[in-house]
Amino acid sequence: MIPQVTVQPLPPEEQKVRRKLDNPGLDKSVTTLSPSRRPFVAANGWQFIREPGARYWYDVPAGAGPLAAAEAHAYGVDATVKIDARDKEAVGKVLAFVRTVPEAKLPVLAQIGVVDDGSEAVGEVMMLLSRRNLLWTVVKAPDPKLALTIRLGSSEFPKESAKDPSEFAYRVRKRISDGKRLLRVFGSEVVLARVVGEGKRARVSLLNYGGGVADGIRIRVRGAYPTASALPDRSHLEPVIDHRAVAGFTELTVPPFTLYAVVDLSSS
C-alpha cells in the first residue's frame, strides 16, 4: 500500500530559513557542452556534507520529486520537498521504500579533507569530488587520519587548478590511487554513493541520477565484509551478486534499482 502523502503549503517565512536546492538529475544542457561528453550530474549531496545541520527545501518540476525525496533521505537531512501534483503517487512509493530501510546511526566515512573557506570555488571542488565518488569531509586543518587534504589556494592545489574539472579529479585520484580508494563504483557515471560505517558494519547508499533502471552496478569497498545484503527500491531485501571479500576489500554487484538502493555490510 502506498502511504498517504501529506500536502502542506510552505509559508514564505519558512522558505527564508531554508536553503534552496538544485533540481536533482542530469543537466543535459551542460552535458552537450562538455568536451569529455561525461554526463553532468546535478546532485545536492555536496551541500549536505558541507552543512549537514542546515535546513533545506526543494522546488522541483514534474518527475524530479521522487529523486529529491530519496536524496534527502540518503543524507539524513532536514528537507522540505515541493513537488508537482503529478508526482504525488511516485513520491509516496519512495516514502514507502524508505520506511523499510533499517536505521543505521553510523559515522560518515571519508578519506579526503577539504578546508572550507566558504567560497564558491571551494563549493565547486566539493561538487566535483562528490560527482566522482571521491569521499570527502570538511576539515579546518590537515587530519593525519585522512589520505589527503585539499586547501584551495595552496601550492599543491592553486585556485587555477580547479578550473579544469577533469584534470583536478585526476590529480586527486592519482594522489590517493585507485587501489586505495575507500569506495569505487563501476558500471555507471550517474550513480553517486554515500558511505557510513564503524567497526564491523558499513552501509553504502546509492542514488541513481540518470533515470531508468541502474543495472549491473558493482561497488568495491575498503574493508573485508563477508556478510552483505541489498535493499533496492524495486523489491524487498535481496542477496547481492558475485560477492567477494578478499585482500582487505569487498566487491559485489547490486541488484537492479531505480532511484535508491542501500547495501549493508558486516564482518561479523
Image: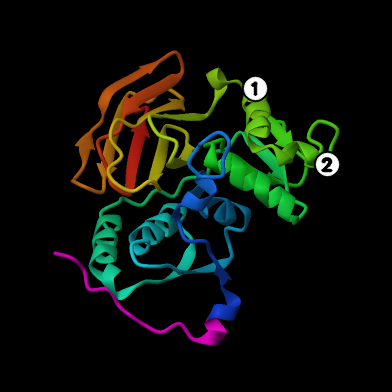
Q: Residue at x 37, y 26 (%)?
A: 225
Magenta stretch: residue 50 in it?
A: no
Q: Does any portion of residue 107 appear in the rendered image?
A: no
Q: Position of residue 62 (x, y in %)?
A: 35, 67
In this view of the protein, which residue sits in the foreground, 12 or 195? 12
Q: Is residue 257 above or below residue 18?
A: above
Q: Does any portion of residue 263 appear in the rendered image?
A: yes
Q: Dividing the image into 4 quarters, which one contains the C terminus?
A: top left
Q: Is residue 193 above or below residue 247?
A: below
Q: Is residue 107 above or below residue 11?
A: above
Magenta stretch: residue 4 in it?
A: yes
Judging from the image, what secondary structure is the residue with disc 1 in? Answer: helix
Q: Residue at x 45, y 82 (%)?
A: 10
Per the image, the residue denoted by label 1 is 174
Q: Earlier in the sequence, mark 2 or mark 1?
A: 2
Residue 127 placement, left or right of 75? right
Q: Dividing the image into 4 quarters, which one contains the N terminus?
A: bottom left
Q: How many marks?
A: 2
In this view of the protein, which residue sits in the foreground, 77 or 268? 77
Per the image, the residue denoted by label 2 is 153
Query: Image quarter for residue 217?
Result: top left
Q: Position of residue 236 (x, y in %)?
A: 18, 45
Q: Position of residue 87 (x, y in %)?
A: 29, 68
Instruction: Please name the amino acid that badge 2 sits on.
Output: Gly
Judging from the image, what secondary structure is the residue with disc 2 in? Answer: loop
CA–CA distance in space, label 2 to label 1:
19 Å
Do tag 2 and tag 1 residues touch (Cβ < 8 Å)? no
| Residue 207 disc label | none
Instruction: Please name the amino acid that badge 1 sits on.
Output: Lys
Segment tinted magenta in the rendering: 1-14
* Predominant SS of the magenta segment: loop
